[in-house]
Amino acid sequence: MVRMIVDFLYHLFYRIYWWNIKVIKDSGTPIYMTFLGTIFLFVMNINSLFFTFCLIKYGSTSQLPGFIYWINISVVILTNILIYFRRKKYKYLTTKYIKSLNERQIKSRDLAVIVYFILSFFIYFIIIVMVDNANNG
């Protein structure tokens, strides 16, 4: 199970990097932008879980102190540093990673990344609407 999660995180990093290079054509800071992209997605997902917990337990998020968000962001940044920058893993992910996979692995991991993106934004949007209704209603 842990290996599946790590493989997914590596593939996510690679695909965001690929997007920055091939689609956006970022030649200046693609690794930095990939790092920021993974942080954005993880913070969005952690906040979705956190907001859901607060809505279930307290019925609102209006009383939450602001430093909670900074703690979430700090934990995500540190986690990303450990995952991608420890032992310079990002170098392997941007150069040799995709060559180590067969066609079937690439397709299944690409599908997982696409589903992850869609679900992340959809669930975050739903949670934000629910939080807004709970805080204003």
Image (tube, rainbow, N blue to C red):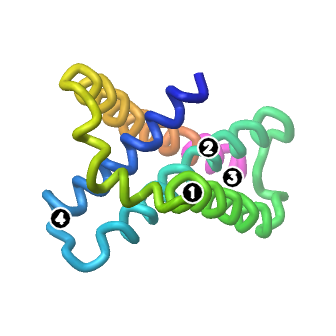
Sequence-wise first label, 2 or 1 = 2
Residue that appears at 15% across and 67% down: 25
Badge 3 is on which residue? 136
Sequence order check: which comes first, mark 3 or mark 4? 4
Crowd rating for badge 4 (residues with CA inside 10 Å; few <14, some 14–19, many 20+): few
Q: CA distance from mark 2 to mark 3?
A: 18 Å
Residue at image coords 29%, 24%: 105
Q: Secondary structure at mark 4?
A: loop
Q: Quadrant of the N terminus?
A: top right
Q: Determine which of the numbered discs, if any, sits on residue 48 in the image.
A: 2
- Label 2 neighbour load within 10 Å: few <14, some 14-19, many 20+: many
- Which secondary structure, mark 2? helix
Question: Magenta stretch?
Answer: 129-137
Taking 57 as reference, is 110 left or right? left
Magenta stretch containing residue 54, yes or no? no
Q: CA distance from mark 1 to mark 4?
A: 22 Å
> Would you identify the image quadrant in which residue 102 lies?
top left
Q: Amino acid at mark 2?
A: Ser
Q: Amino acid at mark 3?
A: Asn
Identify whether 62 is placed above or below 113: below
Which residue position holds label 1? 80
* Residue drawn where x is 48% and y is 61% of the image: 88
Instruction: Give the camera-side residue of 123 and 12.
Output: 12
Q: Is residue 134 magenta?
A: yes
Q: What is the tally of numbered marks visible in this picture?
A: 4
Q: Are marks 4 and 2 in contact (CB under 8 Å)?
A: no
User: Residue 20's spot in the image, x, y percent?
Assistant: 24, 61
The earlier-in-sequence mark between 1 and 3 is: 1
Locate residue 87, reporting x and y percent. 53, 59
- Please give the label number shown on residue 24: 4
Circle 4 or circle 2, nearest the eye: 4
